[in-house]
Amino acid sequence: MSGHRSRGTLAIAMVVLLIALNLKECNSEDTCAFDMDPPNVTCSNVTTKPFLPNSFLGLVAGTEFTNVDENVDPSGATYNVTKGRDGDLFLPGHTPVTLFVKDICQNVATCLFYVENTLTELPVNCPDLNRNVSTDVDKATYTFNPDFGADDVTKSASGYRYHGGGVSVNLTLGGSPLGSSVSIGTHDVVALIYDDVLNKTCTGIYIITDNVNPVVACPADFTSDTLTVSFSADVTDNVDPAPALTYDPVGPGSVFPLGPTTVTVTATDSSSNKHSCSFTVTVTESTTTSNQGNSVGSSGESSGEDADSDDEDSSGSNES
Ligand SMILES: *[C@@H]1O[C@H](CO)[C@@H](O)[C@H](O)[C@H]1NC(C)=O
Ligand SMILES: *[C@@H]1O[C@H](CO)[C@@H](O)[C@H](O)[C@H]1NC(C)=O
Ligand SMILES: *[C@@H]1O[C@H](CO)[C@@H](O)[C@H](O)[C@H]1NC(C)=O
Ligand SMILES: *[C@@H]1O[C@H](CO)[C@@H](O)[C@H](O)[C@H]1NC(C)=O
Ligand SMILES: *[C@@H]1O[C@H](CO)[C@@H](O)[C@H](O)[C@H]1NC(C)=O
Ligand SMILES: *[C@@H]1O[C@H](CO)[C@@H](O)[C@H](O)[C@H]1NC(C)=O
């Protein structure tokens, strides 16, 4: 009888001990035995920030998501997102992201939200592309060699990160690429600035002018025994095939006064660039009605009988 009673007492004591040990050592597990419910999580869509327009670094608890759980200790919950945590870049438009919230009892809740990147063009500043340039030396054209390139691009949103890691620029002048020979006049310059996803087009105006003077060469000084004197001056220009020539005081084929006359020849090209030279014609007293031709390169030998009177060393003086 007593043996039965003591065995029963021992069994009860052991159960009590086990329960006591269990309560003492496994308090949270014991609590979790009753918490089988995931947290109640709500989350809202997010629009990326103006200064960080294509990345998203996570939701802020309490403002962008709420987490209500049976456990009173909210710090026991951990959350994770499927995209964004490690600084991923977000494309323009809506990107779905799943939020996982795990409570202290390992119950997991998920919440789907969207991250919106509202960019429609690359957030960079357009440079001043307007330029006034001259034709190349001794050429009728300008070689397009812009002073703006990818290294000069500046962002308008500081936290933007280029998709693909870098930015590129394609420039055209009057529709022609870098290195093209472009004619005189006004041309549109277009810079396409782009990364792997977005681009921006910036424009400006190039005014290409010819600042190169024509070159006019006068005949050497000479003597004429006729009142009507003919001569010619050579003219070349980088652009204008036939610059206009003016003569002061009179031109070829005119009647000259007796004695020396200094003639100034001025060439003016199609861009109004000028160049002048001068020479002296001396009309002698024994005049006839016949003309004596004189021109560059032939003045010294055009008239055998007057070879003495040519001034061999006085080539035309040039003035710009
Ligand atoms: C979140 O964004 C998605 C995708 O644009 C949309 O379908 C959904 O209605 C939005 N939810 C809320 C609460 O605005
Ligand atoms: C979670 O939501 C369910 C259903 O809406 C509700 O019955 C429960 O009480 C909520 N739990 C908490 C901790 O708010
Ligand atoms: C967060 O989620 C990503 C993928 O969704 C996973 O690779 C990563 O291990 C998770 N991090 C944590 C702390 O849970
Ligand atoms: C270019 O010249 C025009 C006048 O011909 C002037 O209005 C303009 O400001 C100049 N542009 C630059 C970039 O110097
Ligand atoms: C930029 O120019 C290069 C060379 O001219 C060309 O291959 C490329 O397709 C252009 N890129 C764009 C976006 O227009
Ligand atoms: C520039 O971006 C616009 C808008 O995304 C796109 O339609 C266009 O094709 C792009 N242009 C180039 C040359 O990549």
Image (cartoon, rainbow, N blue to C red):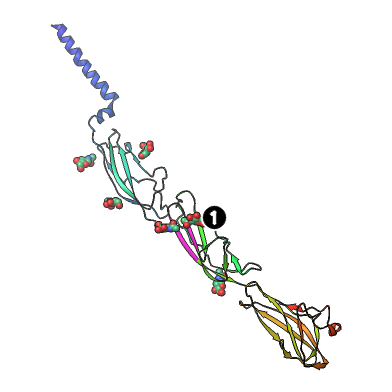
Decide if residue 137 is on the left or right side of residue 17: right
Q: Which residues are magenta?
A: 190-203
Judge whether residue 201 is colored magenta.
yes
Q: Quadrant of the C terminus?
A: bottom right
Relative image position of residue 158 (x, y in whole percent): 46, 54
Q: Quadrant of the N terminus?
A: top left
Relative image position of residue 318 (x, y in whole percent): 74, 77
Residue denoted by label 1? 151
Decide if residue 303 is on the left or right side of residue 208: right
x 22%, y 16%: residue:
14
Relative image position of residue 317 (x, y in whole percent): 77, 78
Relative image position of residue 187 (x, y in whole percent): 52, 69
**Which image quarter has ligand 3?**
top left
Residue type of the residue flagged with mark 1:
Asp
Q: Of residues 288 and 148, which is closer to you in this image?
A: 288
Residue 146 vertical placement versus 84 (above, below): below
Q: Quadrant of residue 72?
A: top left
x 32%, y 42%: residue:
99
Residue 64 vertical placement versus 249 (above, below): above
Judge whether residue 32 is colored magenta.
no
Q: Of residues 93 and 245, which is closer to you in this image?
A: 245
Number of disc labels: 1
Q: Is residue 63 visible?
A: no
Q: Of residues 16 and 222, which is closer to you in this image?
A: 222
Q: Is residue 178 visible?
A: yes
Q: Secondary structure at mark 1?
A: helix
